[in-house]
Image (tube, grey):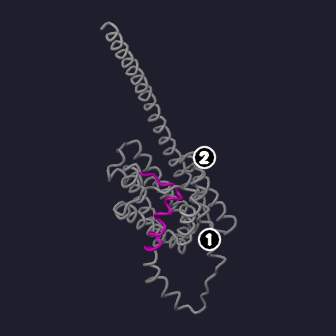
């Protein structure tokens, strides 16, 4: 987070490649700080889950993200409850439950950490809609890092000082590996930069589809390279959840297309109305000029 904050500051303030938004102190304290706190909790819990669970199983649990986002959105009245969508969410949940049942190295504490990370991340995404998008503020991945990463860094320092630092201090053999931490930080920033460029050239839906492909590649990578055990029940359960996520993305895409289709007639009506007003104004001007000539 410190590395991403530094690079984002350079891109926004020094090189001026990305324009900052008008951020007031009140807006930062009421919107960015809660989002940063939730982001730090999501990062801390999800990274901790890797100690107890396999990479492949964590990707399967992450399929619950649409379920968490939709459920929290309904509770906070940002999403409309639909029985069809909820049935789809239940299908995804059943698929993840089957994958968990077939997990060879199941760890309850690890599952709890990952589910907590999913819940905090889903809450963060919904809060972004409530606190920022509803106010007309849109953050791309670079400006998001510029504002959120420093706040997240401060929040992450708290568990690091009280939980991780004492254990590191007790281990005299620990040495800071600049290569590992440096390449990890570069990859984290490169990911956000790639998302920024991808959304700019395509759309957010393309990013979601690419994320689904990434999950399958990570499962294949963990099975073939890291030698994680992936059972047939794992794959069947995740396959069911995968189909549910694909259907959810398809339904969202159809909804966006329907909204755009409704906006076009409205824009056409507005344009026709403005043209009619212009013609009427011209007619009034002609009448006035005719009256002056008569006079």
Which element type, helix, strand or loop, lies under badge 2?
helix
| Quarter of the image where one finds residue 183 | bottom right
First along the sequence among labels 2 and 1: 1
The residue carrying mark 2 is 201
Between 84 and 99, the residue placed more toward the observer is 84
Asked if residue 153 lies in the magenta stretch, the reply is yes
Furthest-top residue in this view: 294
Q: Residue 179: x percent and y percent? A: 67, 77
Q: Which residues are magenta?
A: 137-155
Q: Residue 11: x percent and y percent? A: 57, 62
Query: Which residue is pictured at 42% across the width and 54% down the height?
Result: 69
**Does residue 288 lie above or below 33 as drawn?**
above
Task: Answer few, some or many: residues within 10 Å of disc 1's Cα (few below 14, many 20 plus, some between 14 and 19).
Answer: few
Seen in the image, is 197 located left or right of residue 249?
Answer: right
Which corner quadrant holds the C terminus?
top left
**Does residue 208 lie above or below 144 as drawn?**
above
Query: Which residue is pictured at 40% across the width and 52% down the height?
Result: 129
**Does residue 56 lie above or below 265 as drawn?**
below
Asked if residue 294 lies in the magenta stretch, the reply is no
Between 111 and 175, the residue placed more toward the observer is 175
Give the Cα distance between marks 2 and 1.
Answer: 26 Å
Furthest-left residue in this view: 295
Q: Residue 171: x percent and y percent? A: 55, 91
Q: Which mark is residue 184?
A: 1
């Amino acid at each position: 987070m410190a590395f991403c904050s530094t690079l984002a500051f350079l891109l926004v303030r020094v090189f001026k490649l990305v324009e900052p938004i008008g951020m007031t102190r009140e807006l930062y304290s009421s919107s960015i700080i809660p989002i940063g706190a939730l982001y730090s909790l999501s990062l801390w819990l999800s990274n901790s889950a890797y100690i107890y669970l396999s990479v492949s199983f964590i990707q399967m649990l992450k399929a619950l993200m649409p379920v968490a986002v939709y459920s929290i959105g309904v509770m906070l009245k940002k999403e409309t409850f639909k029985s069809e969508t909820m049935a789809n969410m239940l299908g995804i949940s059943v698929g993840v439950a089957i994958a968990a049942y077939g997990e060879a190295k199941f760890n309850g504490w690890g599952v709890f950490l990952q589910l907590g990370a999913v819940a905090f991340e889903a809450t963060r995404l919904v809060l972004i809609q409530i606190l920022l998008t509803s106010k007309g503020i849109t953050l791309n991945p670079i400006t998001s890092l510029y504002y959120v990463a420093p706040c997240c860094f401060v929040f992450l320092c708290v568990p690091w000082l009280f939980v991780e630092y004492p254990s590191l201090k007790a281990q005299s053999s620990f040495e800071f590996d600049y290569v590992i931490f440096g390449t990890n930080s570069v990859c984290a920033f490169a990911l956000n930069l790639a998302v920024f460029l991808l959304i700019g050239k395509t759309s957010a839906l393309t990013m979601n589809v690419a994320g689904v492909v990434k999950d399958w590649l990570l499962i294949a990578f963990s099975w073939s390279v890291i030698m994680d055990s992936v059972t047939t029940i794992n794959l069947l359960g995740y396959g069911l959840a995968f189909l549910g996520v694909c259907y959810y993305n398809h339904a969202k895409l159809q909804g966006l297309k329907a909204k755009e289709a409704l906006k076009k007639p409205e824009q056409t009506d507005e344009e026709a109305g403005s043209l009619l007003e212009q013609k009427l104004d011209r007619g009034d001007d002609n009448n006035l000029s005719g009256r002056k000539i008569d006079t």
